[in-house]
Image (spheres, rainbow, N blue to C red):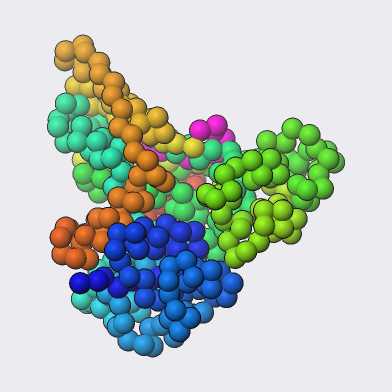
Amino acid sequence: MTTRIAVIGCGNRGADVYATHLKAQGAEIVALVDPRPTRLAEVARRLGVSDSACHDHWDTFFDLGRVADAVVIATPDHLHVEPCLLALKLGYHVLLEKPICLNEAELDVILRAEAASGGTVTVCHVLRSTPFFQEIRGVVDSGVLGPLIGVVWSENVGYWHYAHSFVRGNWRASPPAAPFLLAKACHDLDLLRWYAGSPPLTVSSVGGLHHFRPESAPAGASDRCVTCPVVGCPFDARPFYRNSPQDRWPVTVLTAGGNSVEEALESGPYGECVYAGRNTVVDHQAVTVRFAGGLTAQLTVTAFTHDNTRTLKIVGPFGELRGHMERGELEHHDFRTGLSHTWFVLASGNHGGGDTALVTAWFAALRNEAPWPSPLPVSIDSHRMAFAAERARANGVVETI
């Protein structure tokens, strides 16, 4: 029996990732929702969805009643809650792009709505599904490190990725987008909670917007890269987008809807100077979390790295585990034997294979062949930590959860 899926939000994540993977696995995409007519038409052609099943707002889709088995919600950050609640009211199973919401009180609203619904909410915490982080879970569960005492974790965003997504892109201003930590590192907070195996107790944080400000602009800089005379700027959009693969992210973000790369550089946000001052989210932030089981975790999220990867160190009384996600490298040092072991866990695809793996797991759950991945109650604590960290950073206090 064919599983019918509706997609609400036809951006990169909704259409190019989730819908594309679902269709490849045998799902039928039966409806699309997006306010941009050109993008909607392009995605409909690609996914084989009729014009009559395309909607410019979710209201007209939900007015039809329950016409699918599940919905993917990949709208902008501030537009997740309303369609999710409407979907649950109709009993839909929901694959919800993170963040769940931008207001902490809404976490409990969605929890209650799920409890009252025949549907479920699966949050797109894709890193839980990657072979790399599954392997780390296996090491932690094996007991070779002993009871966990500390974690040092870095989310190395990459200078080019930060410029693309958090200076020029959809997540450059909060509100309406999520704060930097919630938008970029709720995956990391989710993994820390997973490995800790106990709830967070206290959160502290420091950070700020250090570099991507008007006063940091080099002398003579233009408001757009295509007219800028400055030589050697690491954030020059021209070589980055022109020299990147034209059929893959991030270039596909510029060309979605039919624009060329050159048109996007000349008139769109991705050709703007990074020092224009239109961004408000932090570019470097450090967070410390104390968990109920005694583990202390330190997370740093920064724009100022060459690699776009996660690096980590997990320690216990019997050993230390180090990891580098991009290389797929894990290194275990056993204090009791004095032996060390290095091995590699590699997977192809975005997010270390997590996008495909999460979709595969969710699709199997829809067919009653597997448990739900990353269920809503499990995903809540990552968001509570992020909200607490942002309050702690803004107010200079230690937040209790």
* Residue that appears at 30% across and 66% down: 27
Residue 283 seen in the figure: no
Identify the magenta region: 296-307
From the viewer's side, name the closer residue of 159 and 255.
255
Residue 141 lies, in percent from the top left, at 16, 36
Residue 232 lies, in percent from the top left, at 74, 32
Residue 296: quarter of image:
top left
Residue 354 lies, in percent from the top left, at 34, 47
* Residue that appears at 46% across and 49% down: 184
Seen in the image, is 4 located left or right of residue 220?
left
From the viewer's side, name the closer residue of 401 and 345.
345
Q: In which quarter of the image is the N terminus?
A: bottom left
Residue 104: quarter of image:
bottom left
Residue 369 seen in the figure: yes
* Residue that appears at 46% across and 75% down: 33
Residue 304 on the magenta span: yes
Seen in the image, is 66 located left or right of residue 280?
left
Residue 84: quarter of image:
bottom left
As drawn, 55 above or below 222? below
As drawn, 346 above or below 361? above
Residue 98 lies, in percent from the top left, at 40, 58
Residue 79 on the magenta span: no
* Residue that appears at 39% across and 44% down: 349
